[in-house]
Amino acid sequence: MLILYAVLISVDTYLYFKALSIADVSYVAPLITLVGLGNIAGAYVILGQKPTALALVGAGLIVTGAILTYHAKRKDMLSRHTNKIVLLLILTLVVVRGLNSNIEVPLLRESNPTSFNFYSSVLSVPLLIATSIVLLVSSKTKTYRGYWKQVGSDVTEHRWLLSFIGLTYTVNMLATYSAKLVSPNAGYVGAIKSASVLPIMLIGVVFFKEKIVAIQWVGLAVIVTGLVLLGFS
């Protein structure tokens, strides 16, 4: 079961960063909130945890908000093809995360958040590296010859930033695991984490100068309302 979880985590990580690498953060972030629906559905199918009526209303609002933001970006003809690809990546991520976010609950109950985080990372990191190698070998682009040399250079240059990301990610996962052990519905934890969509979109505006049209803000407001309802479920 732990090996299956590590494989799903590796796929999850690849899909997430691939989406971020080819589309605006302000487009990816609202769609990521759909993962909350996958978490709730997975909790019902895998763990037998039924969502409340209020949670279902909140989930419906999240879907509505995500659709609004998606349609707003469809008007961007220059990125239309890319946005379709990202939508497919995110929908696949919804399914994958709906599985792995609930498979981990029985495993957590058998161990503890710290040990589980360590062993799952030990298994998933080599799988991610192996995936990178396979993609590298399958690519015939000559610019990939110096890929690993460039990776080493980038890691050295940004080692403090990467260390910070690693630290905050570890804290994030430990908090998530602990919350799932005490939450009445494991799916709610992932759904509530989707509230990060607001600061993520703001980062896109402030640091990457991305433009957010009015309908996107409306969609974001609908998403946040749905997340609030989930929080009170």
Image (spheres, rainbow, N blue to C red):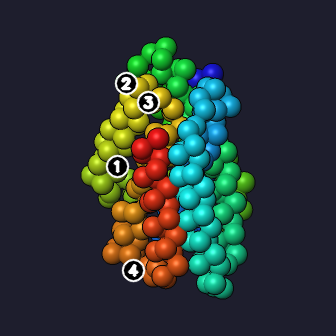
Q: Amino acid at mark 2?
A: Thr
N-terminal of the pair, mark 3 or mark 2, is 2
State the residue position of label 3: 183
Looking at the image, can residue 14 be seen? no
- Residue depicted at x 49% and y 74%: 218
Which residue lies under the disc numbered 4?
Answer: 209
Q: In this figure, which residue is indicated by the disc labeled 1?
A: 165
Pinpoint residue 88: horizontal percent, then vertical percent. 70, 60
Between the C-alphas of marks 3 and 2, the distance is 18 Å
The x, y position of residue 96, in whole percent, is 64, 42
N-terminal-most mark, 4 or 1: 1
Task: Say which quadrant the N terminus sits in.
Answer: top right
C-alpha gap between disc 3 and disc 4 = 38 Å
Q: Residue at x 56, y 59 (%)?
A: 61
Which mark is drawn over residue 77?
none
For this view, does 86 lie left or right of residue 231? right
Query: Tag on residue 114?
Result: 2
Residue 162 seen anywhere in this rendered image of the structure: yes
| First reached walking from the N terminus: tag 1 or tag 3 | 1
The mark nearer the N terminus, 3 or 4, is: 3
Which residue is depicted at the point 36% across and 41% down? 172
Q: Residue at x 50, y 65 (%)?
A: 222
Q: CA distance from mark 1 to mark 2?
A: 18 Å
Q: Residue furthest front?
A: 53
Q: Which amino acid, mark 3?
A: Ser
Q: Which dot, 3 or 4, sits closer to the camera? A: 3
